[in-house]
Amino acid sequence: MMDCDSIARWYRWLEYLGFGRALERRREAFLGDVADARRVLALGDGDGRALVALRKAMSASATAVTYIDYVDISGKMLELARARAGTDVIAYHCDNALTCPLPDSEYDLIVTHFFLDCFEEKYLELLAARVARAAAPRARWVISEFRRSGWLVRCLYLFFRVTTGLCTARLVDHHPVLTGYGFRLLRSESTWCGLLASELWLRENPDRASCILE
């Protein structure tokens, strides 16, 4: 995990400097596929730009969203998100995704953008277990991530280690972890020569996840 309080004010511009709007496009890749969601859990969603895009997509859907729970460990990021996305259907929780209370079998959409790459393998396993317990049957999970390592990703890990206290030093493959908890990859897109990826997952086998969790 990392606390982005120290860079929250500059995060958007640092992102644009390094990647232009490529990360934003990854976050928005599958919005049309999940616009009918009614209960959403967004983890580590940053400064609110992705929340605004999600709400815009949902407003165009015939099925209006009921509620979004947004969890981020950075209070300053939450402030930025609240100012951008509003509070009428969004509850903001300044908390750790690994320990915050989550309802069972509640969410039909999980959103994690450039978040899973913040976890070492043992913590990624714990996060997936918690999400699987909170996810409703047939829930979807939208993910944006760095897909492969290299000098650029190593530089990013170093930067965030210095500025936010991030402990993780390498990318962990989340695919076998999510598969182990009953999710199946439906669609995937990548850009920047495969460096940046967007994925849409479906929870197909809740029983399998329940067995692992027990």
Image (cartoon, grey):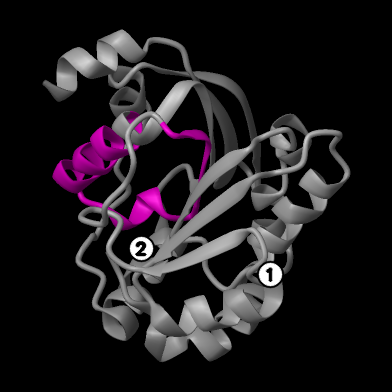
Name the kind of residue labelled 2 in the image.
Arg
In the rendered structure, the answer to whether residue 47 lies left or right of residue 160 reads right
Q: Can residue 144 be seen in this view?
A: no
- Residue ID for mark 2: 154
Question: Residue 195: image x %, image y %?
Answer: 55, 47
Q: In which quarter of the image is residue 7?
A: bottom left
The range drawn in magenta is 106-132
Query: Is 68 rendered above or below residue 14?
Result: above
Within-10-Å neighbours for mark 1: few <14, some 14–19, many 20+: many
SS state under label 1: helix
- Mark 1 is on which residue type? Ala
Give coordinates of residue 54: x percent, y percent.
71, 51
Which residue is under mark 1? 85
Residue under the image location 30 percent in, 70 percent down: 2
Coordinates of residue 104 in the picture (x, y in percent): 32, 33
Image side of residue 75 versus residue 119, left or right: right
